[in-house]
Amino acid sequence: MSNIPNQHASAQVAALALTLSPYQRYILAKAGEARWFDLPHPWLPLPGAQESTARALAEGETALLAPVAGYLGAYELTPLGERVAAAYLRRSLHPEPVARDLAARLTPLQRSVLAQVAARGVVPVSALSSPRASIVARFLASPELGVLHTTSHGYTLSPLGVQVMPLLAEVG
């Protein structure tokens, strides 16, 4: 019975890891480097985007970063931050669950654009069916999803997109 809370906590950690943007995951990795690689000093974010993102990740009851005592402006991972970073790393090493989750979350229009690219190999931006489909294709090619690659000729499937395609039929 004592494993049930741990399983529930692990599911929450995995869910939290999925909500982070690529930039937030990058910030977690930067903050973890000092401990992971035995660096002599904790991570100090650059002013601007790094600093504001680190501050945001250090707030609330699910803070993933904490200020380092004795190092003004420096951050390190909290125990929860360590677990979230590990959960994301685990998922990136085993991409099939990522592809399956992504396939289940795609909207009908996103699936349609992805199928169009898969069927044609390369889809020029001008060949997409509507301005809305062009916007969707740009989003599918963004670091958030990464199922399409942008080339000088248009859009092609990324390796993740290739993994997602056969899973679309399974998830509905």
Image (cartoon, rainbow, N blue to C red):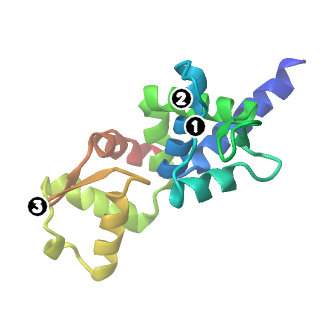
Q: Name the one closer to the observer, 74 or 138.
A: 74
Indicate which disc, 2 or 1, sits on the residue closer to the N terminus.
2
Which residue is denoted by mark 2 in the rendering? 33
Position of residue 48 measured from the top left corner of the image (x, y, whole percent): 53, 61
Determine whether, in the image, residue 144 is placed left or right of residue 77.
Answer: left
Relative to the observer, which residue lies in front, 111 or 48?
48
Could you classify mark 1 by the number of other residues whose Cα lies within 10 Å: few (under 14), some (14-19), or many (20 or more)? Answer: many
Is 128 situated left or right of 52 in this image?
left
Residue that lies at the very extreme toward the left in this rendered image: 153
Amino acid type, mark 2: Glu
Q: Name the residue tied to disc 3.
A: 152
The residue tagged 1 is 43
User: In the rendered image of this protein, does residue 154 appear above or below residue 129?
Assistant: above
Q: CA distance from mark 3 to mark 2?
A: 36 Å
- Discs 2, 1 touching: Cβ within 8 Å: yes
Q: Nearer the viewer, mark 2 or mark 1?
A: 1
* x 47%, y 38%: residue: 98
